[in-house]
Image (cartoon, helix red, strand yellow):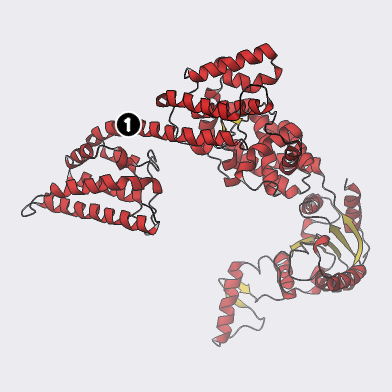
């Protein structure tokens, strides 16, 4: 696509004649201008070329604010040793020596460590003779392009040299500046070219550069598809995407790559590019961005407009989306945690194993292919299974609610949406003691077991809020039993107990769980006071860290406010256990622990007042 530009540049660079004009390589940001010029320069690193790489000066004007800075950068390129930090330190010493009255020899040098050092000078015009200067980023400086062309035009006419300018011409603003720019451009630029993105060549180059060639075909095809559908013309964005894809791949187990590499790279590339282009900017857009791209070959905005136009309340997407609950963390937070990805993938696999796949998921995936008798039978079966406690995970109940409300809206099943919600609530009440308690409700806000919800169905959100309360109650019951056994074992391993309590460098086992609220405070007090004073102090310190009093900017999480009542009771019980300190160091040290408990209660009062928490 750009071969004619490359051929012309080669002829221009290698010509023995002085053309006395410059070339302008232009195009939008990310179209491949720098990629083009780097490829061109690499040609002259090979032996036997008409010019050598040391005769080429590549100069970026990024961040330059004054003409004098161009002099500095040219000097740095021509004299890297004289521009080094060591030399600057040495010349600083020379300047100090001159101020101190130290004489410099007649050659104008000072011998330092056996080397003659000369203060840096501006570059001499003759040093640029027969050189090729490539000036990149002419639009990324506060200088006007007319100033840049004016500066280099002096060299162009006086010396036998070549100039290639690179930049995004389209961002020049202001009529006066455009007029000045066009006038001096006419005198300086002899020919100009617009770089067209060489998508396929660039993608293959990036894949090879980043050593992604072990899955090259899938990545290449998925990348080209995304570029086409999303109309991405910015090669810089594509390279950034593939760079991050490599990091993502490193977090994947071998088993996941072998089974899902094509699906995962397709989803990653699609989402990363849509985020980079600003098409998606919110985590809640993730699922629809995947569905719109994969099912309808369009970006998120176009897909949402199409849904609005057709008034869809349910998408016909029937595929399982691997890692669907954590894509928002991967794309928006750059969370490539290997453990998190592996655990999420395994949870999805366990929930929907083909050999044990539940009828609910068969219904979700295959309902469109069922005839009337099959569909009716499957609906009756799934309804019965819900009533009989087959679906006890909140994610399963939410999927059931989602698809039944949608079938009702379409008229595929009888009754109203209100009837369905009331029936589900009644069933939940009957089985609530058996509902599986879960901790990560953030995950269920997006999907369960790799299947996505329709967040626009308000009835699903109502059931979600309803079942969340029940799940939390069950979670607390489960935690109470676990904590009770844990407290019995404190004396066996105090350090392990403290690790479960603290946050920083701890296990986070009870993160944002009201630990003291869930304990039998009398049992806890008895076990605590049976320990040595040193171990008692260690346990109190772990709670101080947990609640944030240890840190100057500590935070008391809202969930921990429930701990306050039992903390007060613990403090009162501890005070009653204190004895006379005379001749008793043990009781003296216990007195310090009591003070810390009182200070912790005061901290709770202050934090609750500051945050207006009851």
Q: Is residue 378 in view?
A: yes
Q: Is residue 16 left or right of residue 254?
A: right
Task: Work out which residue is located at the far left of the displayed protein and give it.
Answer: 583
Frontmost residue, 5 versus 499:
499
Q: Position of residue 177 (x, y in %)?
A: 84, 72
Residue 18's place in the image compared with 67, above or below, is above
Residue 76's place in the image compared with 549, above or below, is below
Residue depicted at x 69% and y 29%: 317
Frontmost residue, 256 versus 601:
601
Q: Is residue 37 left or right of residue 609?
A: right
Q: Position of residue 520 (x, y in %)?
A: 25, 37
Q: Is residue 435 in view?
A: no
Q: Position of residue 407 (x, y in %)?
A: 65, 25
Frontmost residue, 277 versus 251:
277
Q: How many marks?
A: 1
Task: Work out which residue is located at the far bottom of the displayed protein and give it.
Answer: 101
Instruction: Give the crowd class for mark 1: few <14, some 14-19, many >=20 residues within 10 Å.
Output: few
Q: Quadrant of residue 331?
A: top right
Look at the numbered disc 1 and give the secondary structure of its residue.
Answer: helix
Q: Quadrant of residue 214?
A: top right
Frontmost residue, 380 versus 523:
380
Q: Is residue 149 left or right of residue 335?
A: right
Residue 354's place in the image compared with 177, above or below, is above
Q: Position of residue 479 (x, y in %)?
A: 35, 33
Residue depicted at x 28% and y 53%: 600
- Report which residue position mark 1 lands on: 482
Residue 344's place in the image compared with 354, above or below, is below
Task: Work out which residue is located at the far top of the displayed protein and give it.
Answer: 373
Q: Quadrant of the N terminus?
A: top right
Q: Quadrant of residue 226?
A: top right
């Amino acid at each position: 696509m750009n071969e004619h530009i490359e051929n012309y540049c080669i002829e221009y660079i290698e010509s023995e004649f002085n053309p006395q004009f410059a070339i302008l390589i232009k195009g939008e940001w990310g179209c491949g201008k720098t990629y083009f010029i780097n490829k061109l320069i690499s040609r002259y690193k090979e032996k036997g070329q008409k010019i050598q790489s040391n005769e080429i000066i590549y100069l970026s004007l990024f961040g330059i604010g004054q003409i004098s800075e161009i002099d500095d950068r040219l000097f740095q390129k021509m004299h890297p040793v004289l521009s080094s930090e060591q030399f600057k330190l040495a010349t600083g010493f020379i300047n100090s020596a001159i101020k101190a009255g130290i004489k410099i020899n007649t050659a104008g040098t000072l011998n330092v460590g056996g080397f003659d050092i000369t203060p840096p000078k501006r570059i001499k015009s003759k040093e640029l003779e027969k050189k090729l200067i490539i000036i990149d980023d002419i639009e990324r400086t506060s200088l006007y392009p007319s100033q840049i062309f004016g500066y280099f035009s002096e060299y162009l006419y006086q010396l036998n040299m070549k100039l290639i300018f690179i930049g995004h011409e389209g961002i020049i603003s202001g009529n006066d500046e455009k007029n000045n720019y066009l006038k001096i451009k006419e005198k300086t630029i002899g020919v100009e070219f617009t770089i067209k993105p060489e998508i396929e060549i660039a993608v293959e180059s990036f894949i090879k550069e980043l050593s992604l060639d072990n899955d090259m075909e899938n990545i290449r095809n998925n990348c080209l598809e995304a570029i086409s559908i999303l109309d991405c013309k910015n090669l810089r964005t594509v390279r950034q995407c593939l760079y991050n894809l490599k990091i993502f791949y490193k977090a994947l187990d071998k088993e996941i790559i072998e089974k899902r590499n094509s699906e995962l790279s397709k989803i990653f590339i699609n989402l990363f590019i849509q985020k980079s282009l600003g098409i998606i900017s919110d985590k809640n857009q993730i699922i629809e961005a995947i569905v719109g791209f994969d099912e309808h070959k369009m970006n998120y905005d176009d897909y949402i407009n199409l849904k609005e136009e057709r008034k869809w309340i349910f998408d016909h997407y029937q595929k399982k989306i691997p890692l669907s609950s954590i894509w928002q963390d991967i794309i928006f937070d750059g969370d490539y945690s290997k453990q998190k990805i592996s655990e999420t993938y395994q949870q999805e696999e366990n929930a929907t194993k083909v050999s044990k796949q539940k009828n609910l998921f068969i219904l979700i995936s295959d309902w469109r292919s069922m005839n009337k008798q099959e569909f009716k039978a499957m609906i009756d079966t799934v309804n019965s299974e819900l009533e009989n406690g087959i679906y006890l995970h909140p994610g399963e109940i939410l999927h059931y609610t989602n698809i039944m409300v949608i079938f009702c809206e379409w008229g595929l099943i009888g009754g109203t949406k209100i009837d369905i919600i009331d029936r589900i609530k009644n069933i939940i009440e009957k089985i609530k003691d058996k509902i599986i308690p879960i901790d990560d409700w953030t995950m269920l806000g997006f999907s369960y077991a790799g299947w996505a919800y329709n967040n626009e169905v308000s009835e699903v959100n109502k059931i979600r809020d309803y079942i969340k309360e029940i799940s939390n109650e069950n979670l607390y019951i489960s935690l109470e039993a676990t904590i009770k056994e844990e407290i019995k074992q404190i004396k066996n391993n105090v350090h392990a107990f403290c690790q479960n309590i603290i946050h920083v460098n701890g296990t986070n086992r009870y993160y944002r769980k009201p630990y003291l609220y869930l304990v039998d405070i009398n049992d806890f007090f008895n076990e605590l006071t049976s320990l040595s004073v040193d171990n008692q102090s260690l346990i109190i310190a772990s709670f101080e860290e947990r609640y944030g009093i240890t840190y100057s900017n500590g935070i008391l999480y809202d969930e921990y406010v429930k701990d306050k009542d039992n903390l007060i009771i613990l403090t009162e019980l501890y005070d009653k256990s204190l004895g006379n300190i005379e001749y008793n160091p043990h009781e003296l040290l216990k007195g310090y622990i009591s003070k810390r408990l009182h200070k912790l209660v005061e901290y709770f009062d202050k934090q609750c007042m500051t945050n207006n928490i009851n």
